[in-house]
Amino acid sequence: MNLAELQENAIRHGFSHQFVYEDGVLRCDGGGPVYDPADLKIVHSNSVDAGTDPGDDATLYMIEARDGTKGMMICVGTHINRDIPVFHVFSQNEHKPALLAT
C-alpha cells in the first residue's frame, strides 16, 4: 500500500481527523482542540517505504482520543519523533494496538 491508500483505509475505519504536533502539543485538525497525551492512544500504525532514500519512508498512526475523536498523524522518515508526547505515553501503555483489516 502507498501512503494515499493507507489514508483512505484509515478514513474507512473512522479515523477522519488529522492530528498535528506543534509547539509541544497535539492539535486536532489544525486549529481544533488540543489533547493531553494521556488522553490519546495509538490504535494502529502502518509504514510505507517509497524507495531507497530513508527520507521517503513514512508511518501513518491511527490515534483515538478519550472523547472518541479518531484521527491520524503521519510521520515522515525512518524514526518516530520521540519528542512527540503521545509516543511517550504509547510506549508505557500496556494495551497492544488493534489490527485493522484493509
Image: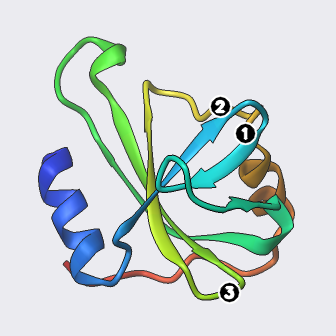
Quadrant of the image occupied by residue 20: top right
Give the left or right position of residue 8, taking residue 101 as reference.
left
Q: Residues within 10 Å of mark 2 (few under 14, many from 20)?
A: few
Identify the residue position indicated by label 3 in the image: 67
Residues under labels 2 and 1: Cα distance? 6 Å
Identify the residue position indicated by label 2 in the image: 81
The label number, if any, that marks residue 84 in the structure image: 1
Q: Residues within 10 Å of mark 1 (few under 14, many from 20)?
A: some
Q: Residues within 10 Å of mark 3 (few under 14, many from 20)?
A: few
Query: For the residue marked with disc 1, what is the amino acid?
Result: Ile
Q: Are marks 2 and 1 in contact (CB under 8 Å)?
A: yes
Which mark sits nearer the N-terminus, 2 or 3?
Answer: 3
Give the left or right position of residue 22, taking residue 78 as reference.
right
The correct choice, above or below, for 66 with respect to 71 in the image is below
Residue at image coords 18%, 29%? 50
The correct choice, above or below, for 84 with respect to 97 in the image is above
Residues under labels 1 and 3: Cα distance? 20 Å
The correct choice, above or below, for 18 with respect to 30 in the image is below
